Amino acid sequence: MDFLKSAVASIAKGPAFPYSFGDRVDIDQSIWTLHNGTRREDGSRCSIFSFDINANKSRLALARNALRKFRTIRHPGIIKVLDTLETDTIIYIATERITPLNWSTRRKALSEQSLLWGLYNVAKTLKFVNSEASSIHGNVRASSIFTSESGEWKVGGLEILSSMKEDDAVMFSQGSLVPDIGRYTPPEVAKGSWQSVRTNPLHAVDAYDYGILISEVFNGGFSGSEQIGTTKNVPLQMQTSYKPLTHAAPKMRLSVAHFLEQGSRSGGYFDTALIQLSEGIENLGLKSDSEKDEFLGELETVAETDDFPEEFFKVKVLPELLKSVEFGGGGAKSFSLVMKIAAKLSEDEYDTQITPVIIRLFTSPDRALRVCLLDNLPQMIDHLSQKVVSDKIFPQMVTGFGDLAPVVREQTVKAVLVVVPKLSDRVINGELLRHLAKTANDEQPGIRTNTTICLGKIARNLGPSSRAKVLTAAFSRALRDPFVHARNAALLALAATADMFSEEDCATKMLPALCPALVDKEKMIRDQANKTLNIYLERVRKYSTTLPDSILPPPEAASAPSTRISTPQPGMGGQVLGWAISSFTNKLSTATGEIQPNSNGARPTPQERPTSTPPVNGLQPRPANHSTPSAATVPKVTTGVRSATIATQVEDEDFGDGWGEIDDDPSAAWDDDLQPTSASQSHTSKPSTSSVTYDDGGEPDFEGWLNAQAQAKTASKKPLPKGLAKKPTTTASAARPAAATRNSAPVRPATSTAAARTVPQPSAQSKEEEDEDWGDAWG
């Protein structure tokens, strides 16, 4: 039957008390059992005092008095009650999450600043109980004091708290039932009874107990009456006021209110930074701008020290600062302090308290606040998920790229480095690069410089398909920037990203872009250019050792049986290869006639004959890799020439002099697919104009072919660059009949005419412009 009653009672009380019990908390000198608990509705933390009526009926009056006082007396210094429940068998009091003060004082884990702050709060509470409530606590000691989650000391132990206006106050009839009360009762109560309290000052009992509390917290416990009134470990400033608290005569005792007043004076024992902070934070929203700035400066100083409880900053200060930032105009200074305190929060606490505020603040139009957010982004980014950054933070952040204030644009560029690891590849290679392309052309040189630095640091985050193209265009443009630090940033970025370019890009794009910096007007740029150039040269040289000596097919792999290619043989130190003209292969042995004399009447010897044959399709001879004067490579023969080759080795000829006779203008020696000849290959002497003809034995009409090539280039849609076009000249060869048959012996001058000197020109399309076409804004 008893079992059924308890079951029914538990069912009845379950829903009525919406809190779950957790671990039991050990407390001493109390009639209550303390448990950690949670609220079922939202999971918030709490503490639960429970009193078993059946097991402790003699002290039921004390429990019910405490329950009633908790419900009726509300003060910040008294434990905050959330809910209560009283049945025939049990009393529950749910409060804010608290911890017994004895846990800290016995281990001497609190600093002197924290102890003074706690005593200050207890003194304010007792002043309220004695003065405003006209009551006596009667049970002030360390076991009746608890610390909240904010680190503040909260007064409990209200079992005999009584108003002197009550005739049937519990204190007078039940005061002696409080556990271990005898050690803490003042002398007048110990000698008489609790009734003597009525004849003494209202503050006498609590003042005496408060004096014991001071000695107890500074010494880590209370050993007995011999410790009362001793100043051991009590701060020197407090000793003078402390002794009157425990005076044997009740009327001579200093009230707690007076003790509080003396300590709060300038330079007093309660005039500390932490106490001032705790008082100021509660009135932060009421302060003027100047007062707020002064207070925040002091708060920042306090937050950097380790003498103050972290819980107070996390639970008490942080919420007030967040309110000030978001609604009270606290501004950037308040937010910087928020970030310092938030660094000590757990991930769950950060997600609950800080992240929602950050998201809302990024939508604020306040520029100062935006700059502060971007400055503190490195401290926040680790606590923000990738989804929050991509969906909530970055879309608001990119508005800073186009802000009218340069400082906002600059801070936005710097913040890119922080958010890039949490952005998707699509966002990085799309929207982000478009914004950086704009800041790379910003009117502020510092922003252009920082954009170049930013690109160098996020280069590895760019897509492999567009990375080289983007960096080539951006850095090449920065190398031409008039701002010296922008050019230096480009050189440093190129040095840091050298491994991201292919060897071909290093040789054909990067090295040409770097070379002008070698002669920069600033020595800093020249020095850095040399260092960067060496990095690229070393890479290209290393790559060149892996390339084959030649890509030409071996003689036996030639496709045409009639083609012959002479190959330099070992030991031929004084010989070089002659010209390879394919149409000469089958006709050289059948050539008839005599070589005509030159302009001075003498027949040319093999050494006097011009060493160069007119180039086919604009090709020029290139020396082979040989220690002796090199042999010419086999040029490609186009229209009108059979696909066959011949090579004739000529000793001790100077090919450079012969190439110079083609044209006096070196710039005219360009071909669509070849590099220009060097200045040393041009010849300044005028060609011979002898009109003496000779029979070449069927040699192809190269002059006519060259004329056709010149006409084709003249009709091209892409004209030559300005300065490279040649003025038309009229020579005797221009009137030469073009319809010469192959079997007739053509008559040709001993030297080339002006028409023969006309060769194809390079295309006007610039390779650099093609490379920079990744985005118009980069140009």
Image (cartoon, rainbow, N blue to C red):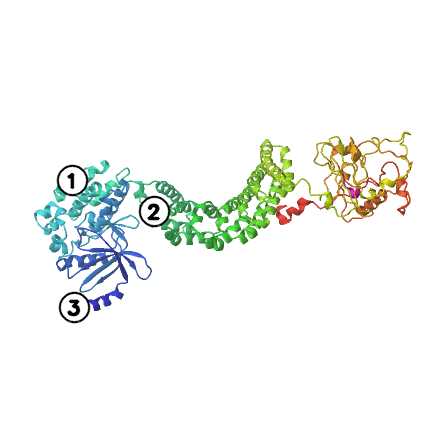
What span is in magenta?
616-620
Figure check: 379 above or below 688: below
In the image shown, does 593 or 163 lie closer to the viewer? Answer: 593
Badge 3 local density, few (<14 within 10 Å), some, or many (20+)? Answer: few
Kindly identify which residue carries mark 2.
Answer: 313
In the image, residue 617 lies in the stretch drawn in magenta: yes
Give the x, y percent position of residue 105: 23, 44
Q: Secondary structure at mark 2?
A: helix
- The type of residue carrying mark 2 is Phe
User: In the image, what residue occupies the spot 25% across and 39% down?
Assistant: 269
Kindly identify which residue carries mark 3.
Answer: 2
In the rendered structure, the answer to whether residue 272 lies left or right of residue 659 reads left
Give the x, y percent position of residue 738: 89, 46
In the image shown, does 267 or 523 lie closer to the viewer? Answer: 523
- The label on residue 184 is none
The N terminus: image quadrant: bottom left
Give the x, y percent position of residue 36: 26, 55
In the image shown, does 96 or 285 lie closer to the viewer? Answer: 96
Kindly identify which residue carries mark 1.
Answer: 229
In this rendering, the label closer to the viewer, 2 or 1: 2
For the stretch drawn in magenta, what is the main secondary structure?
helix
